[in-house]
Image (cartoon, rainbow, N blue to C red):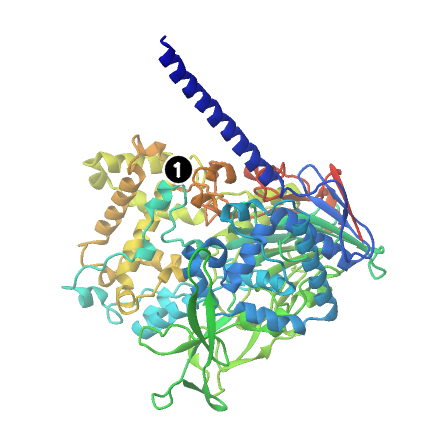
Amino acid sequence: MTPRMRRFFGVIVALLLALVAASAAGAWWARAQLRGSLAILDGQVRLAGLHAPVRVTRDALGIPTVRGGSRADVARATGFLHAQDRFFQMDLARRRAAGELAALVGARALPIDREIRRHRFRAVAARALPLMSTGDRALLDAYADGVNAGLRQMARPPFEYLLLRQTPAAWAPEDTLLVVLSMFVTLQDDDGSYEATLATMRELLPPAMFDFLAPAGSEWDAPVVGTPFATPPVPGPEVYDLRARRRGKPRTPIPESLLPDFTRVDAGLAPGGSERDAMAIGSNSFAVAGGLTADGRALVANDMHLTIRVPNTWYRASLEWPDPSAPDGVYRITGVTLPGVPAIVAGSNGRVAWGFTNSYADWSDIVLLETDRSRPGEYRTAEGWRRFDRFEEVLDAAGGDSERTSVDWTTWGPVMEPDFRGRPRAYRWVAHSPERLAVSIRPLETARTLEEAFDQANGVGAPGQNILVVDRSGRIGWSVYGSIPRRTGFDGRLPVPWATGSHGWDGWLDPAEYPRVLDPPNGRLWTANARVVDGDMLAKLGDGSYEIGSRARIIRDRLLARDRFDARDLLAIQLDTSSAFLDRWRRLLLSTLTAEAAGGVAARAALKDVVDGGWSGTAAAESAAYRLVRGFRDAVFRRVISFVLAECYEADPSFDYTAVRRREAPIWQLAITQPAHLLDPAYETWDGLLLEAADEVIEQATRGAPGELRDRHWSEYNVTAYRHPLSASLPFIGRWLDMPRSELPGDLYTPRVHWGAIGASERMVVSPGKEAEGILHMPTGQSGHPLSPFYANSHEAWVRGEPTPFLPGPAAHTLTLHP
């Protein structure tokens, strides 16, 4: 080698070594920055404001037991822990409710902020704060101080802020109320879409057609009180001959809201489409009385279904503090907390245990406004004409310009977009009421009996939920958690004017007026987002689009099938993947694939073979038959809905029939009765429609995927996607932040719910006083920090459905917080 070549290679080697050194230094620096925001697990830390030391022990999963000298000290310590483990999650929640996400993550969040800002939730929270009781306000103050102390103890901000090049904003007491309001947004209808959908149908369809397509229930109902409601009959051609009305008109395209989005499947997400994520939020809860267990203790099971993100919605904890009013001098409460809130959401206090499911009762109303062109800027009320209140809102966007927007409010709530006729509307929602939001944020902590629990839960300022409670004596009960409006002059199902005062809300129901079911004779209770009661109790709750009762019915049947239970028996029901109501769609598909229809088409014959021979009746991850039958049902839905409701979709651009959750009943009736007057003229017969749906299933299953239909498993379509909020924006490190993909069983209609990112955010089974024998597991882990040992170490047990203990285990770390 010549000297020149040696010098050249020497330079190259030096450059490579420098590059390696720079990379190593960069990696060391990045790791040091990240490690600077890891939670403190052991040692001594000063926490100003404490009245006595607080001892925090964590077990091998990172679950803390917080032992303090008072409730306020425990709240302060809980704030410290939440900040150290989950601050970014808390920040997103408060910003989501306040409409301030773009200020943190940039202009891409402005559409979300614009939509939510009309509710002015930051102002609602600020108005609620001074209305709180002295004790609750002190708790929020202590918690906020603890959060800010937890932030200050970090050597570096949480890693998300380093990536976003932002500084975390301090926590304020009203931010806890914003976190509560964020759950309203998650769990309830924030734009009146269900009521607006019904209003469009009621205006454009004959009454009998409206009743048919918006049924009060179906044969799938499994209420605790009452019986299933019959599905109305299909209206005849003398009522609505849609085929004749549409003949000669262009074929109605399938609305975008009904179409599966295969870009989501390609990206590893559930396809969305006909089952919008927002429409799939639900939960299961069920209970058995002491007469059905070996030791006479009642059991409650609860799995709350939410969009699972990294970290998980919940943060497990056990809280203890002395109090002379406690049965044994100490309150001990264990379960799941919501980061941002200093209380146990679901769990056990040793005397009672409780769990929740979304109620889908009616918590809001669209108000038709009366205006007059001669009185611009005004609307009519029972007290006369009144000017709209206009608020100027500023939407900040990180790295971009601020945006100004105006929000108009009425005495009832914010002004909405006009309806499809151009009529002005406002929105009345429980979430807009600061006097309700101010009601206790920590109910059930001190309850000792069913009655005490319900007295504390009825009327709280939180999203309305079904609540199941069991007590130490073996009793069980159901009621509603939240504030129920007292409607006057109307049932709340459809929009009406409130200007005369003859329609509206007249305060709130008292706890004594709330629906309750105590000590049912059969010793069993169940809820799964469907209708629970009927008669006067149902009238008080109204209809916010109850779910079809498929999950409730399966759970009820499993509970009635035996008369002895333990915690593992109830966990087995939570993990059940039976889907009874798809059996009939399988039979319809097989009857569609006749010898004549399938004989000359190899793909149809293969479809028939898989569906006929591979069906187990469960949403098994490896089941191709389940995927194909589910796809057939959805394909039929799209064709039937887009035609039968064509006039609604054409007249109202915002119309969305998927807001009607009980649509299974009418669509099934049309598919089996096959009325000619409700068949799209594009088809000569209903068999033609069904065959086209079957062909679509084949095309979708084989789309871009070589191989046989029998290899197109359910898990290939229903993909798990448990992601960190920033991972999609950071493709190089996203996989490091997300949970590993797993082939999971389940569907929206099975007790074990799994639909893309939606699933059981926890599974809990517990008996008060027997917490050591209880079960609790959840996805992801306790920490939101990817370098923490607790970032994902709870996940596999949840994936496998293992019965991990309800109580925290032996202490692996001990941290003492000193005044």
Left or right: where does residue 405 sit relative to residue 531?
A: left
Left or right: where does residue 179 sit relative to residue 391?
A: right
Q: Is residue 326 above or below residue 301?
A: below
Q: Is residue 496 above or below residue 656?
A: below
Where on the picture, by quarter, is residue 344? Answer: bottom right
For image coordinates 24% across by 57% down, the residue present is 253
Which secondary structure lies at badge 1? Answer: helix
Where on the picture, by quarter, is residue 28? Answer: top right
- Foreground: 523 or 21? 21
Most extreme residue toward the left, as rendered? 248
For disc 1, the neighbor class at 10 Å (few under 14, some 14 to 19, many from 20) is: many
Q: Which residue is mark 1?
A: 716
Q: How many marks?
A: 1
Where on the picture, by quarter, is residue 613? Answer: top left
- Foreground: 657 or 65? 65
Q: Position of residue 593 (x, y in %)?
A: 26, 42
Most extreme residue toward the front, as rendered? 3
Tell me if I can see residue 322 in this picture. Answer: yes
Q: Position of residue 228 (x, y in %)?
A: 48, 61
Q: Position of residue 655 (x, y in %)?
A: 34, 65
Tell me if I can see residue 532 in this picture. Answer: no
- Foreground: 653 or 129? 129
For image coordinates 65% across by 70% down, the residue present is 129
- Foreground: 719 or 112? 112
Name the quarter where the N terminus is drawn: top left
Q: Position of residue 209 (x, y in %)?
A: 32, 69
For image coordinates 30% across by 43% down, the residue present is 697
* Mark 1: amino acid: Glu
